[in-house]
Amino acid sequence: MDGNEKKWENGNGTEEARAEEIQMEEMLRDLTDDVQVPLSLEPEAVEEMLLKRKREKKRKSGGRYWRKNAGIAAAACLCLAVGIVAAVNFGGLGNLVSGTADQAVSGKNSASESSMAEAGGTEDGTVENMVTAADYDEIYDYIQEGVKQQEKQARLFDSGSATGDGAVAYSTEESAMMDSGAAADTGNTGAATGDYSDTNVREEGVGEADVVKTDGEYLYLVARGKVRIVDIRSDEMDELAEIGVDEDGEIREIYVEDDRLAVLYYRAEYDDGETGYDGYFRNFTCTDVYDISDPTAPEKLSTISQSGTYNTMRARDGYLYVLSDFYADTAAPRSGVDLYVPEVQGGMLEASDIYMPQGGTGNSYTVISAFSLADPAEKTDGKAVFGNSGICYVSTENIYITESYYGLADVTQTSVRKISYHDGQLEGVGQTKIDGTLNNSFSIDEYNGYLRLVTTVEPCDTGNAVPILGDGLFRSDSEDAKSNSLYVLDEELEITGQITDLAKEEQIYSARFMGDVGYFVTFKQVDPLFSVDLSDPADPRIIGELKIPGFSDYLHPYGSGRLLGIGMDVDEEGVTTEGVKVSMFDISDPADVTEMSKYVLEDMYGTDVYDYRAVFVDVEKNLFGFTAYGDTTEYYMFSYDETEGFREVFSRELMSYGNVRGLYAGERFYLVDGNTVISYTLDGFEKIDDIVL
């Protein structure tokens, strides 16, 4: 349970009762292990445990899972030759207004007066203005209105049916940990920075944190609860220093730039309730910034803290932007402002820094802090946006926060909220809503000022709806009613164009945009790979298709006119999987896409490509690597030749099955497996050294 977890001590319950409640929650999670649970709704420790449990279950099940389910899965990859076009199926636009809520153009005097049954807009797509709060009282009223709507939805859920008069908002997994799909944005081919490899990032030019980093001379990695600094300047590796956090903290990721190291961690702070309120826990995301000019003696410069659990982090032009998910204590009294208003750097955000879109559900925020790595002593800016944080995508200029809904209209919908950023300053731009829901952060992409999105659209057919355990939703069980859509929005989030009803009866599995060309993969049975020409926004045309068995759930540009795919091989009948498949597609002619070559790892039934940062790709060195799961866990490295096809150049059985990274510095390749680092020659992959941390 994220946010402020209470420890009741007023006679209505005990610590033992709370322990039983936690045990019951764990039992429910065990029963719904196969359901995608939004990670942002879990405490960080539980989140990690659940993730490892899911991975272990997938690994142990081996081929049984895929053999059983492959009959419903193979893929079509829609190749979109995208001109600068756009599409949404309604024109509603809500601006983020720096001012008070009584400035809303809808005629309502405050955000809290807007009925949450209208949250996010009306069924025809009209979206209310998104405005900042007038004061904390308005925020409290907004939250309480959300509580009423949640109680209403709970009653609907208990009854086993849904009506169309209230909106259900729900999150989807972003943490960059669970993203599947493409590994990088426009033009990013996985090339190194200098003579060493960098993290496989979502957007070229926007840095990301990870569990392992290198600057070419040292490795920085998270191992056994601490950050370890390892000297890799010679063949023999040597641990130089370690960095820990408070005993109640848990390190999530790290980021390295020049002589700065940022350690991002989660901590829970207990308040005993001496101020008159019962004891409770507060969750914080913290960033410790270190000077590592002397890696043997890292010097701590400052700590930036903010309310909520860690979501993600991005870096641009020397500034860090940290996002966290804060859940308001809905049972707090009006006077308990610190329980329902988030903090940044020890001070509550001003009401004027909190955006209150009518599309929000009223009890959770995405908190954003921005600060300089060079001078991190004080925060540069801080903002919060109401709404269940779903997929967060960060371009080189804007932060997009999305939230998906069931029940606002006849189909599922997604709200898109845009926050611009520059040199540590944050400013709300606007919001809109599109039909359908995003698969992951690769389903949303910004290019030349246009925002492109691909979604899967499902009907909200209450007569055919079934409850989905784990997220409290009702969704239609009518598979034949699904379809997919492509949307592109301009800088003001206004409509430009659209394509709808793509790949009916299927669902988006991954996406990839490459400048004026985009791809998205759907799956159900063996289906065609479509090419769509969108150079004329008014006349999009399907110009080609290719039928292939199997599917790719990871896509990466691999040189001019080539696209690498990593996924699963499926027989022609779509019944049995043959193993993990790597494919090379010729996309030089979007009207005639072909599968140039494929390679199958037999008896392997899953990969780690859902976390794009775990994939090593360097096109210039003609190498790519990833982890595959079967009866054993293996790390594989491949090269590609147009004549010979794929060649396996290296493999190693792993001791762990999570947070495995491959990277290089100079002429050495480093395989990080948990708390073990093994070095190899980059040419030939002969072992050089190993170190256990």
Image (spheres, rainbow, N blue to C red):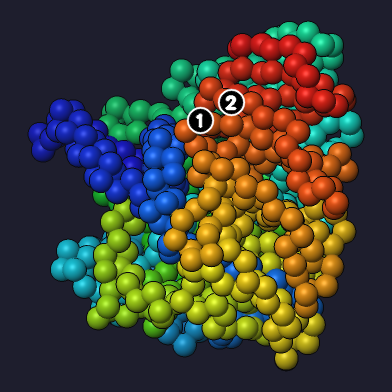
Residue 108, position as x, y percentages in the image: 44, 80
Is 501 above or below relative to 359?
below
- Left or right of 431, for residue 84: right
Taking depth in this image into account, of 562 and 16 the one nearest to the observer is 562
Q: Which residue is pictured at 25% across the width and 81% down the height? A: 463
Q: Residues within 10 Å of mark 1 (few under 14, many from 20)?
A: some
Q: Residues within 10 Å of mark 2 (few under 14, many from 20)?
A: few
- Left or right of 141, for residue 87: right
Residue 225, position as x, y percentages in the image: 52, 20
At label 1, the amino acid type is Thr
Residue 140, position as x, y percentages in the image: 36, 57
Taking depth in this image into account, of 513 and 622 the one nearest to the observer is 622
What residue is pinned by disc 2?
Answer: 653
Q: Which residue is pictured at 42% across the width and 69% down the height? A: 405
What residue is pinned by disc 1?
Answer: 632
Query: Helix, strand, or loop for circle 2?
Result: strand
Is 576 above or below relative to 608?
below
Query: Helix, strand, or loop for circle 1?
Result: loop
User: Contact, CB < 8 Å: mark 1 with mark 2?
Assistant: yes
Q: Is residue 354 visible?
A: no
Q: Which residue is pictured at 73% across the width and 8% down the height? A: 238
At label 2, the amino acid type is Glu
Residue 292, position as x, y percentages in the image: 76, 19
Q: Which residue is pictured at 40% across the width and 35% down the height? A: 60
Is 341 above or below relative to 691?
below
- Res 672 quadrant in image: top right
- Left or right of 28, for residue 360: right
